[in-house]
Amino acid sequence: MKISILGSGRWASCIAYYLNRAKGYDITMWELKFDDRPESKLFLTHKNEYLELPKSIKMTHDLREALDFGEVVIISIVSQQLSNLMERIKREYGEGFENKKYCLCMKGIEQDTGNTLTKVLRKAGVYRSNIAVWVGPGHVQSISRGEPTNMEISSYSSKYAEYLKNSFESEGYIDICTS
């Protein structure tokens, strides 16, 4: 399976590490490039304070490239930036962005509007059946050490939730329930 991960923080890198290591999936990670800042340590070295990503995980600043790559687009960024990201996706990807399969690996609400993160995607035009949320009590430190944990995937579509559960779960590592 090909997975795009939008974000390059600790949790995004943990998800990339897990899906590549435990499931063998091809991963492309997208990192926002700021003109006035250098790339992150993760982007440059494939390492952060908790883990080292294999070189097979591709890093890019090209949003269109990342979106085109994945069968599923995992978003793991700061919640308050989700609306901006969705506007950028609509602008750069154009028609068809709403047909992509999205999985939010983040939590919170928009402080300015009170919107849930799934509502942010719906307001951007993403079809309800293409939205899922993957969360849990997992911690980067535990997952990077291979310690077992439980997580949950929820979606408006039970079919999509079950598809992600079957695709992301690994016996004895991460057990996933759906709702």
Image (cartoon, grey):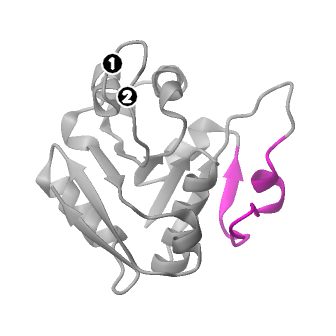
Q: Does the magenta stretch include residue 49?
A: yes
For residue 135, side relative to residue 75 (left or right): left
For residue 98, side relative to residue 80 (left or right): left
Q: Is mark 1 on a helix, strand or loop?
A: loop
Task: Give the tally of numbered discs.
Answer: 2
Quarter of the figure with the C terminus: bottom left
Give the residue displayed 60% in from the left and 43% down from the top: 65
Give the residue displayed 31% in from the left and 37% down from the top: 99
Tag 2 near tag 1, CB within 8 Å:
yes
Q: What element carries label 2?
A: loop
**Does the magenta stretch mainly form a helix, a strand or a loop?**
loop
* Amino acid type indicated by mark 2: Ile
Q: Please tell me whether residue 93 is drawn above or below residue 162 in the rendered image.
A: above
Q: Please tell me whether residue 160 is drawn above or below residue 150 in the rendered image.
A: above
- In the image, which disc is placed on residue 114? 1
Q: Which sits earlier in the primary sequence, circle 2 or circle 1?
A: 2
Q: Where is residue 136 in the image (x, y as percent from the top left)?
A: 36, 59
In terms of image quadrants, where is residue 48? bottom right
Q: Please tell me whether residue 58 is drawn above or below residue 131 in the rendered image.
A: below
Quarter of the figure with the N terminus: bottom left
- In the image, which disc is placed on residue 109? 2
Q: Position of residue 83 (x, y in %)?
A: 45, 22
Q: Where is residue 29 in the image (x, y as percent from the top left)?
A: 61, 52
* Amino acid type indicated by mark 1: Gly
What segment carries the magenta color? Answer: 39-60
Give the residue displayed 31% in from the left and 21% down from the top: 115
